[in-house]
Image: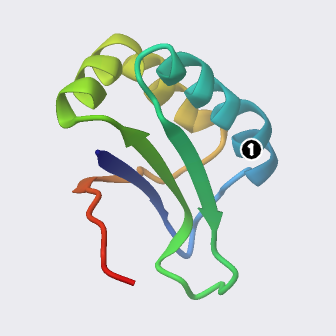
Amino acid sequence: MIDVMVAYPNTDTLFFDDAYYLEKHSPLVNSLLGEHGLRYLRVHRCIDPQAPYHLVAHLGFESVQRFESAFAKVGDQLLGDIANFTNVEPVLQVNEVVDTPA
């Protein structure tokens, strides 16, 4: 299992339309990637205005290959929507999900 982190940097000149992201972009992500193996979408919004990221989304996929295949098919459409809600470029990081003992 992998988790793709999509983080939007919190800059001095940040514009971010939270309502658009939550009401339009997130459903678009779920719809388009859901058809291609998206297991979950989790959105985390900062509560500290000094945090390094304004918003971080986590997308779960069974494998890197599954994510890459999905993104190859619908990535352009998702990337094209970013300008509708922010003026910053997101940072992507692909992570392996590991369990930790309780």
Q: Which residue is mark 1?
A: 22
Identify the amino acid type marked 1. Leu
Q: 49 above or below 20? A: below
Q: 68 above or below 64? A: above
At 25% from the left edge and 18% from the top edge, which residue is drawn? 69
Residue 67 sits in which quadrant?
A: top left
Residue 30 sits in which quadrant?
A: top right
Q: 7 above or below 30? A: below
Instruction: Tell whether 57 sits left or right of 66.
Output: right
Residue 84 sits in which quadrant?
A: top right
At 34% from the left edge and 20% from the top edge, which residue is drawn? 70
Percent coordinates x, y for residue 53 in the rendering: 50, 71
Foreground of the two, 101 or 44: 101
Percent coordinates x, y for residue 57 in the rendering: 52, 53
Q: How many numbered discs?
A: 1
Foreground of the two, 77 or 70: 70
Percent coordinates x, y for residue 52 in the rendering: 46, 79
Percent coordinates x, y for residue 5 in the rendering: 39, 54
At 65% from the left edge and 37% from the top edge, which residue is drawn? 26
At 54% from the left edge and 83% from the top edge, which residue is drawn? 51
